Amino acid sequence: MGNVVDDFITRVYDVVRSNRDGGVADYIPELAAVTPDGFGIAVATGDGHVYEVGDTSVPFTIQSISKPFTYALALTDRGVDGVAEKVDVEPSGEPFNEISLDPDTERPRNPMINAGAITAASLVAGAGPAEQFERIRDLYSRCAGRPLVLDDAVYDSEARTGHRNRAIGYMLRSFGVITDDPDDVVDVYFRQCSIEVTCRDLALMAATLANNGVNPLTRDRVLNPALVERVLSVMTTCGMYDAAGEWVTEVGMPAKSGVGGGVLAVLPGQLGIAVYSPRLDRHGNSVRGVQACRELSRDLELHFLHVTRAARSSIRARYSVAEAPSRTRRTEAEQQSLEAFGNRGRVYELHGDLLFTGAETAVREIDAERADLEVVVVDVRRVDDVSGVARRMIELLRADLAANGCRTALVDPDGLFGHASSSLSPDDPHGRVFADPDSATRWCEDVLLSRHCGAGRQPDSIELEQHPLLADLTTVQFSRLTDDLEYRTFARGETIVRRGDREPGIFLILSGRVSTSVTTKTGTVQRISTLSAGMSFGEMATLLGTKILNDVRADTAVTVAVLTPERLARLTTEAPEIRSALIERLAAVAYGQVEMLLRTIEGRGRL
Ligand code: DON
């Protein structure tokens, strides 16, 4: 029992099987000896799974399907220009074995017709024909993911009868397109055509081309991606010879056929298809191969020009830091300032694959708002992949904004843009790179506060008597309480209180910054809030006599004054008025926190 994809492919197989049109190639005598009704379909995915129906492990000769692979090897060995001097990339509109050169350039029109393929074989590096052939065989084998061998009988048969190809070889030699002995070159070509493959092999070879030159099963990087692009381009326009136009219209995939009965088709970035069925049409293309590819393309919507949906904006969300503040507790003055100016700091969350068009929408939309912006955060956590040009566009936008006084930061924990989060100093012209959005939002707020909030900013450190929690105490109460407090310091990164600690004590922060966080079941640390001098933690669990619900860690060096549960208990009996003054202040602070959390949820639509 197969899955739904097996069912799709089997349906195509059943529909096409009844077609017995065409005849097997007989101009190479040995090819006439095959079972004409053999039929197999194989589809290899980008992660190397192969769906197979019918005769997918029957060996047959690769024939012209060898041509794109030898062309790829010639490109690898000689470079694009070195090959372009000898073979053009224009569709010929002629049969594959036409004895012709382009009258103007005096070069073969493309590497998919025999004249171009023989030329490509001559360009493969190697000390002689035997070594050239070995390198060709090795490349095909790596694309198929197993060692491929020569079918001696078919090779002998073609070598005995291939006079037309010899004529092409001599023509090429006489025009100086090939410089080696034409018999040797044509012999390498005969051998490459006689390499034995199965339908499954061809599907994996197709998938290697679809996968930018990496064999999806072995993960072997066989070909350079830029060269694969060129090979697929030529397959698109010339792969099906004089039927290329109809093929592109009806099937819409770069492809190559062979008179051995194989057809190979590539859907770039997605999958490779191979069909085996030896009866051929008048162009030398497998009749069922063409029909099966047409059916698959239609059924599975594989045409490479099929647009599944209109391009969507790469910006999935945008909000200002006024709408979605960081989880940092702020003073009254800071909050007011952020309410007034928070709209000038904005976060843009991007998503999907960021290629040119995705970067274009992002750049255009951010740029249109630049007059209102002082700080921009570009959050790329949900971007799956980014192309070179998209990366350049975002970096150029950031540099341009920076040159005009607008600070920028990236949230890029996976380093998609090539910067480690910690590698950039605060003064780096490219701006900051953060691993998490809350730190970026806090930074964004800090930039705005440094520009707009004069008085009333949270100081880096305070004296105990300035701590707001103690504001309602009389002088006597204050000095009574100070006797009960312990001073403690923590280094950056140290855990101050651990989730589950019972009655940890009431911690009054005098200097430095701490963050409260929870660790989710998957092990990620989720920040709840950031606290600094003048704030406190541990009070709820201590007053209620329960366990604390989150971890508290020092983000910087930290000094705290702690009222331990034992001292609190003593205060409760000896000075209950101090306890109630503390609780009143704490209630006010707690209400402020809830309010801030609600605004965060409101702004981001999530916690
Ligand atoms: O050169 C030839 O005639 C054969 N070795 C290969 C031709 C071929 O496969 C044409 N494609 N459909």
Image (cartoon, grey):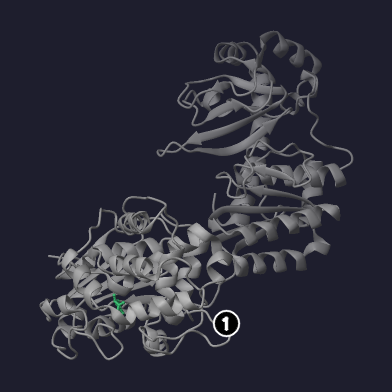
Q: Position of residue 248 (x, y in %)?
A: 41, 84
Give the answer, above or below, for where 477 lies relative to 234.
Answer: above
Is 81 situated left or right of 184 in this image? right
**Residue 315 appears in the picture as rendered:** yes
Task: Looking at the picture, tell me which residue is in the foreground, 327 or 280.
Answer: 280
Q: Is mark 1 within 8 Å of ligand 1?
A: no
Q: Is residue 320 above or below residue 568?
A: below
The residue that mark 1 highlights is: 105
Helix or strand or loop: what does disc 1 sit on? loop
Residue 24 vertical placement versus 362 (above, below): below
Residue at left 52%, top 79%?
107
Residue 222 in the image: state x and y as whole percent: 41, 54
Which residue is nearer to you in this view: 15 or 318? 15
Residue 591 percent coordinates (x, y): 64, 41
The image quadrant of residue 11 is bottom left
Taking 165 as reference, is 356 above or below it? Answer: above
* Front residue of 590 and 372: 372
Residue 54 x, y percent position in the rendering: 14, 71
- Crowding around mark 1 (Cα neighbors within 10 Å: few <14, some 14 to 19, many 20+) is few
Which residue shows up at 74% across the image and 28% down it? 534
The kind of residue tagged 1 is Thr
In the rendered image, the residue lying farthest to the right is 454
**Residue 305 at least partly seen:** no
Please report the residue visible at 67 percent of the width from the left and 32 percent of the height from the top: 531
Left-right relation of 414 to 486: left
Q: Nearer the viewer, residue 251 or 567?
A: 251
Query: In what quadrant of the picture does the N terminus appear?
Result: bottom left
